[in-house]
């Protein structure tokens, strides 16, 4: 009997020998507990008048409206999602450009990109958002005599996007560098320019590798979007803080905020898992 | 007297302290098939890679069809399009099918129309003996099949020169012949070829020149028959006895 046959015959046996504790280990109990817990908490909260008021204030308030990116936004949840998605898309594009600059042989591009990445990674995101909100935005407004004034939401988006671009640049760079150098050589030996080789040979392979880490960073960004509350962007946390300062009900206000964040991140965590699974099968 | 299609003059290449090439003067005439042999680390790959400027020489010049690659005005991408290269590890593009591997550079470098490049890809896959693998990804091909696709990919550019860097040394023994047969057919068409290989059967059948390199220098440059009958240098004799043992 050949080695191959032995292996294929042995395989089902190995599976059936999985112990009870291994099977228990593989089942996503944590997810069941989490979903049950959230559902119970949510139902319980809806029974209470105070919690209903807190959730109402964050999810569907009567006033506090702002227009950002041409969309009328009113609720904390929608502001959080808008800030996250817009910042993420900007960071994806800017990060890709910075990542390519970092692997390119051009010294000016390399050093510019490295400078940017190191500065941004050396400053806490919170400080960056405050700095843009209270230094850059007023500075631009005064310098242009009010012609160029970012809204609070736009300032918050700029801070998150500029900061995350530096992180994502590193993800892209690692992805590009993980492609064997023979790929670039083969492309160049066929007469392709550096840009053509990047575009048709290196990036298509690198992007596939960075989709899972990039998707994870979306979830991280969703949570970090709470930071823009410091520049009074009316997202979930800011709405909760407003609610607490008006009613002095910290318990209800922050519990509601935490629950809403948890629901949102979990939805995306499951989405990321799904994407990762799909991608692994394709690759 | 025709002009050499490849000419290197006093070619040096240093990697830090390592002197991979230490003054190589080589002329290859059109339609010549030159086989380069020599011990590992003797600079064979570096010489090939200098010929298409994947490595920039530390000193000296490479001329392709009389064009100096060191000249700032030389359009290196245009020169490279005329020089096919086949690598030891194939370096096929794994995200593209065999057919797409062959059509990509035709599209972006040669700017050929869709129908033309597809036709060329079909013809070349038939020529290397795997017409049925057009829509298969490299990961599903055997090593020998991958290397034949890689040769087809290079040929699709209609190069004037083909460089081979140990094209069979990563292959299982039973696949070596299928690749060498493709190379042999190519040699018969009058292609200028420079092949780093220790396949002596191929050298005898296809090469009109055999070049022995050691420590970054060309030690011997002669015909295959002459090299076997009468190697001039001790080092050549020693090396030949080693590679002819198996
Ligand atoms: N990119 C590189 N960086 C540093 N050293 C290198 C590089 N490429 C080749 N070398 C060195 O140059 C010498 C010649 O290498 P190579 O041309 O690959 O030899 P061969 O192909 O004959 O085995 C070796 O000592 C090798 O280690
Ligand atoms: Mg080599």
Image (cartoon, rainbow, N blue to C red):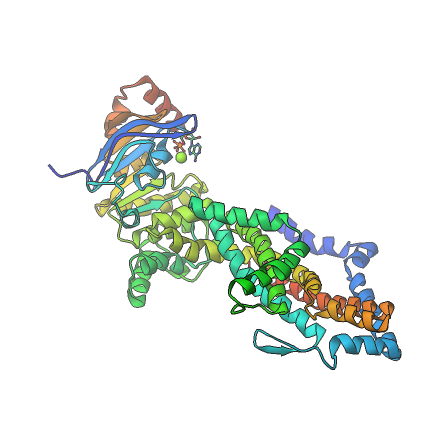
Which quadrant of the frame does ligand 1 lie within?
top left
Residue A18 horizontal side relative to residue B66, left or right? right
Q: Is residue B94 visible?
A: no
Q: Nearer the viewer, residue B182 or B88?
A: B88
Residue B49 versus residue A89: which sits nearer the camera? A89
B211, above or below A237, in the image:
above
Image quadrant where one finds the C terminus of chain A? bottom right
The residue under the point 68% across, 53% down is: A11
Which residue: 65% across, 61% down? A221
> Could you tell me if residue A124 is visible in this image?
yes
The reply, left or right, for residue A123 in relation to residue B168 is: right
Instruction: Tell me where residue A215 sits by quadrant.
Output: bottom right
From the viewer's perspective, tell me whether residue A162 is left or right of residue A228: left
Percent across and percent down for residue B215 are 37, 24
Where does residue B161 sit, x and y in percent of width and height?
Answer: 26, 45
Residue lying at the far left of the rendered structure: B1
Residue A65's place in the image compared with B175, above or below, is below
Image coordinates of residue B138 in percent, x first then y, are 46, 54
């Amino acid at each position: 009997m050949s080695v191959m046959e032995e292996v294929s015959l042995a395989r089902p046996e190995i599976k059936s020998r999985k112990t009870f504790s291994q099977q228990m280990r593989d089942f996503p109990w944590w997810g069941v507990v989490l979903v049950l817990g959230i559902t119970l908490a949510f139902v319980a909260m809806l029974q209470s008048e105070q919690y209903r008021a807190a959730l109402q204030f964050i999810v569907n308030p009567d006033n506090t409206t702002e227009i950002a990116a041409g969309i009328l936004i009113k609720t904390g949840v929608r502001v959080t999602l808008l800030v996250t998605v817009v910042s993420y898309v900007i960071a994806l594009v800017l990060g890709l450009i910075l990542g390519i600059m970092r692997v390119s042989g051009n010294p000016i591009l390399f050093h510019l990109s490295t400078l940017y990445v190191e500065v941004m990674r050396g400053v806490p995101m919170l400080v960056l958002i405050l700095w843009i909100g209270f230094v850059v935005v007023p500075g631009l407004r005064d310098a242009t005599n009010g012609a160029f004034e970012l809204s609070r939401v736009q300032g918050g988006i700029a801070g998150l996007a500029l900061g995350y671009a530096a992180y994502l640049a590193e993800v892209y760079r690692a992805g590009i560098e993980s492609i064997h150098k023979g790929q670039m050589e083969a492309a160049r030996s066929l007469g392709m320019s550096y840009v053509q080789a990047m575009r048709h040979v290196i990036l298509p392979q690198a992007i596939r590798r960075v989709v899972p880490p990039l998707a994870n960073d979306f979830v991280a960004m969703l949570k970090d979007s709470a930071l823009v509350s410091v520049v009074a962007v009316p997202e979930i946390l800011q709405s909760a803080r407003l609610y607490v300062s008006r009613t002095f009900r910290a318990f209800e206000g922050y519990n509601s905020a935490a629950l809403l964040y948890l629901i949102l991140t979990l939805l995306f965590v499951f989405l990321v898992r799904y994407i990762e699974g799909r991608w692994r099968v394709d690759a | 007297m025709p002009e050499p299609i490849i000419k290197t003059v006093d070619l040096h290449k240093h990697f830090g302290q390592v002197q991979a090439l230490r003054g190589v003067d080589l002329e290859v005439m059109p339609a010549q098939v030159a086989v380069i042999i020599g011990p590992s680390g003797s600079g064979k790959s570096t010489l090939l890679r200098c010929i298409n400027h994947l490595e920039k020489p530390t000193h000296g010049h490479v001329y392709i069809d009389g064009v100096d690659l060191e000249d700032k005005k030389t359009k290196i991408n245009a020169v490279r399009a005329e020089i096919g290269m086949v690598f030891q590890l194939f370096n096929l593009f794994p995200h593209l099918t065999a057919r797409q591997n062959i059509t990509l550079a035709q599209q972006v470098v040669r700017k050929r129309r869709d129908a033309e490049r597809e036709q060329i890809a079909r013809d070349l896959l038939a020529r290397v003996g795997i017409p049925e693998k057009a829509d298969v990804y490299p990961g599903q091909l055997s090593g020998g099949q991958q290397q034949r696709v890689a040769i087809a990919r290079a040929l699709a550019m209609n190069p004037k020169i083909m460089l081979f860097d140990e094209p069979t040394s990563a292959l299982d023994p039973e696949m070596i012949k299928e690749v060498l047969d493709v190379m042999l057919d190519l040699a018969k068409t009058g292609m200028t070829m420079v092949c780093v290989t220790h396949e002596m059967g191929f050298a005898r059948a296809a090469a009109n020149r055999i070049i022995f390199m050691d420590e970054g220098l060309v030690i011997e440059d002669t015909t295959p028959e002459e090299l076997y009958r009468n190697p001039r240098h001790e080092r050549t004799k020693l090396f030949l006895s080693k590679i002819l043992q198996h």
